[in-house]
Image (spheres, grey):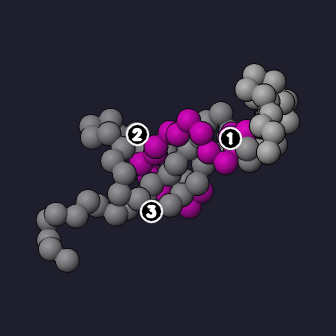
């Protein structure tokens, strides 16, 4: 690897406040230079934190609150609008 061209790969905490979930992983994501936002983790160390809007704790697909589309009704509306082809 060439030196000086790769971003820093370091531990970062991703936090979903609406889903009350935080997890520690390694990432090259920037956390906003100069903000100094860190969080104290369970191991006693401080890590940079990135707040996310959606995670598996708050996404409707993963929580079971997903809205089911009425695909049969949509197909019937299509056939009413454009008719059925006689084959």
Q: Which label is found at residue 37? A: 2
Q: Are marks 3 and 2 in contact (CB under 8 Å)?
A: no
Residue under numbered circle 1: 59
39 relative to 33 in the view: left or right:
right
Q: Which residues are magenta?
A: 42-60
Q: Sequence-wise, which precedes: disc 1 or disc 2?
A: 2
What is the crowding at mark 1: few (fewer than 14 residues within 10 Å), some, or many (at least 20)?
A: some
Q: Quadrant of residue 63?
A: top right
Q: Which label is found at residue 47? A: none
Residue 22 image point, x, y percent: 60, 48
Residue under numbered circle 3: 26
Q: How far is disc 3 from disc 1 in space, using C-alphas?
A: 22 Å
Q: How far is disc 1 from disc 2 in space, using C-alphas?
A: 25 Å
Residue 56 image point, x, y percent: 67, 48
Front disc: 3 or 1: 1
2 up-or-down from 83: above or below: below
Q: Is residue 79 visible?
A: yes
Residue 75 image point, x, y percent: 79, 34
Q: Residue at x 69, y 39 (%)?
A: 58
Q: Sequence-wise, which precedes: disc 3 or disc 2?
A: 3
């Amino acid at each position: 690897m060439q030196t000086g061209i790769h971003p820093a790969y370091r531990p970062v905490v991703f936090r979903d406040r609406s889903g009350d979930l935080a997890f520690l992983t390694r990432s090259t994501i920037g956390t906003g230079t100069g903000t100094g936002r860190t969080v104290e983790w369970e191991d006693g160390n401080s890590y940079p934190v990135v707040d996310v809007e959606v995670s598996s704790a708050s996404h409707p697909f993963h929580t079971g609150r997903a809205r089911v589309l009425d695909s049969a009704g949509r197909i019937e509306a299509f056939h009413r609008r454009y008719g059925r082809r006689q084959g």
